[in-house]
Image (cartoon, grey):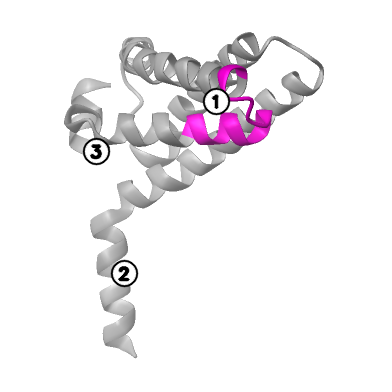
Amino acid sequence: MGNVQQFCNHQYQQHRNFILYGVIGCVTTAIDVGIFTLLAYFNMHKLIANTISYQVAMVASFFLNRKYNFKIKDKMWQRFLSFFIVNLIGYGLSQLLVFLFITKFGMNDFIGKLLATILAAICQFLLPSWQPSASSCSSSI
């Protein structure tokens, strides 16, 4: 039994940043989709609702990753600005997908936003310079 626990512990330590990045991503996705759905329920224009929800979730993502994942405390505003600039591409893709899915294809607000958020997150993650790691985040964000 000790070997299994040791193996699991080793795997967790080896993939800790990725695991925490995923958990924080799920939390901020829930924030993003939740705020969007609430604003859409009250008939806010979909792209304005997406702008507000995306920005709130992005700020939450920065501070949650900063505190729990990468534990970086220096140059906060410089790192936030870098993080914000990187996220502008994800925001642009999210806006385009929300427009297409909800406005053009007539999808349900919640489903369209959730799908747009997931696709934008996958695209951001797959770009090599944005992959999360403690070393890359401490030097670039």
Looking at the figure, which quarter contains the C terminus?
Answer: top left
Looking at the figure, which quarter contains the N terminus?
Answer: bottom left
Query: Relative to 47, does residue 5 appear above or below in the rendering?
Result: below
Residue hosting label 2:
9
Left or right for 4, reference 24: left
Circle count: 3
Between 101 and 14, which is closer to the camera in this rendering? 101
> Considering only order in the chain, which callout, 1 or 2, is on the residue closer to the N terminus?
2
Callout 2: SS: helix
Q: Give the range drawn in magenta.
A: 103-117
Furthest residue toward front: 105
Residue under the image location 39 percent in, 21 percent down: 90
Callout 1: SS: helix
- Which numbered tag is attached to residue 101? 1
Q: Which of marks 3 and 1 is in front?
A: 1
Between 110 and 77, which is closer to the camera in this rendering? 110
Q: Which amino acid does label 3 sit on?
A: Ala
Q: What residue type is labelled 1?
A: Phe
- Which numbered tag is attached to residue 134? 3
Is residue 111 on the magenta stretch? yes
Residue under the image location 66 percent in, 24 percent down: 36
Callout 3: SS: helix
| Residue 129, horizontal then vertical, whole percent | 18, 28
> Considering only order in the chain, which callout, 2 or 3, is on the residue closer to the N terminus?
2
| Residue 86, horizontal then vertical, whole percent | 31, 17
| Residue 82, horizontal then vertical, whole percent | 30, 13
Between 59 and 93, which is closer to the camera in this rendering? 93
Residue under the image location 33 percent in, 11 percent down: 85
